Image: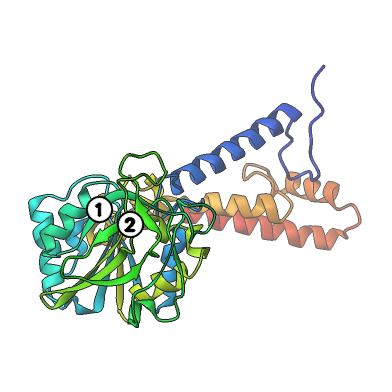
Amino acid sequence: MASTPVSGDSRLPSLSLPQLLLAAYTALTVIALVYAASTSSAAFGAYNAQWDGAGELRTVAADTGASVTLGTNVSQYPTADADGTVAVVLSPTEPYTSGERARLAAFVRNGGTLVVAEDYRPHGNALLAAVGADARFDGRPVYDNRNYYRNASFPEATPAGDYPETAGVDTVVLNYGTTVRAGDATPLVTTSEYAYLDTDGDAELDNDERLASRPVATSESVGDGRVVAVGDPSVFVNAMLERGDNRRFVRNLLDGHDSALLDYSHADSLPPAAAAVLAVQRSDALLLLCGVVLVGTLLAVDRRLDERLRDYWGRDPAPEPSLSRDSIEQYISARHPDWEREQIQRVTEAVIKQRTERQRND
C-alpha cells in the first residue's frame, strides 16, 4: 500500500513517509559530519571541549585583552618587535626542526615570552635548550601524600614568592605532573616539603625517594625575552583551570601582552574544518580565491531560478508562457470565481506584459 503524501500547502512538494525519514537521516548525518570536522578529542586540543581539552584556554587569553592566534606553523612567531607577544607550547608531540628552534630562539631573544608546559615527553626539554633556557623538566611524576586535591597524584603547590605570575594565587593544583630543575631560573611555584618524585613508578614513597619542596614552575630571562617552564600541561586544560587558583595563574602568565600565540604546530592535528578556516585566514591568496569562487557562484545562478522560487513560495503559480489570452482568463476565473470580469482582464494584461518582458530579457 502506498504511503500517504504529506503536504500542508498546495505549493509545497508532497513527501511520502519514507522520503521524510530519508531527509531526516540525511540532515542528522550532515550535522554529525560537520561536528566531527570542527571538533577534536586530542588532549590539550584547542577544539576539544572535554575535560582534557584546552578550548577554554583561548577564553582565558582573550580575557586578558590580547589578540589570540592559534598557531599551526612556526612562521607565525614574530622575530622582530616580539616583546608584545606571549607564546604557549603544551607538551609537543614531535620535535621542532633546527630551523624552527632557531626561529623560536630569535623570538625569545628579541623580547618574546615563551611558556613551555611539559611533563614526560622529551620535546619540552629540547625546546628549552634550543632557546637558551636553563630550566629542565625532571620527567618523573611528583606525589604529595599530605597536600593534595583528590589524591597524592594531584599535589597542591604554592607560590615561592611575590611575583606578577603568582599575584592572587594561593594554590596551583597539578594532575600527574612533574617538577622543574630550576638551574639559574627563578622558582615561581613549588610543592610542599612532603612531595616526592616517584622514581620506580609504584606511586608509593620508598626508602630511596626523598621528601622535599621542589619547583613546578620557573621563570628566567633569555636575551630580551623570558621563558616560563611549567611542569604540568594539565594545568591549562578545561577541567584543571577550575582547580585551585589555576585559572588565575594561567591568566597571569598571559597578562600584559598585546598578542597571545597558542602554538599547535607540533601538537596532534587540528580538526579538518578548523584547519581549513585557519589556513584561509593566514593566506591572502586563499582568501582572495574563496572570494572569487563565491562571487562567481552567485553570478552563475540564473535569475529565472530566483524568480521561480519567489513564485513558488510567495504567491500563486503563474500560468505557463505558452497559454493564450483566453486560457489565462479561464485559469484566473477558475482560481478566483468571485472576481469581476474587468478585474480578471486587468490581471490577464499584467500577466501577458510580465511574460513579454521576461522573454525580451532572456
Relative horizontal placement of residue 38, taking residue 344 as reference (left or right) = left
Return the x and y of residue 305 as percentages of the image width and height.
54, 49
Return the x and y of residue 329 as percentages of the image width and height.
78, 50
Decide if residue 215 is in sight here. yes
Return the x and y of residue 351 as percentages of the image width and height.
67, 56
**Front residue of this view, candidates 359 and 87:** 87
Q: Earlier in the sequence, mark 2 or mark 1?
A: 1
Q: Which mark is residue 138?
A: 1
Quarter of the image for residue 46 reads bottom left
**Front residue of this view, candidates 198 and 358:** 198
Relative horizontal placement of residue 176, taking residue 287 as reference (left or right) = right
Quarter of the image for residue 286 reads bottom left
| Amino acid type, callout 2 | Leu
The single residue placed furthest to the top in the displayed view is 1
Provide the residue designation for mark 2. Answer: 278
The quarter of the image holding the N terminus is top right
Q: Secondary structure at mark 1?
A: strand
| Amino acid type, callout 1 | Asp
Marks 2 and 1, how far apart in space?
35 Å
**Front residue of this view, candidates 51 and 70:** 51
Decide if residue 61 is in sight here. no
Return the x and y of residue 227 as percentages of the image width and height.
21, 69
- Vertical placement of residue 26 versus 302, above or below: above
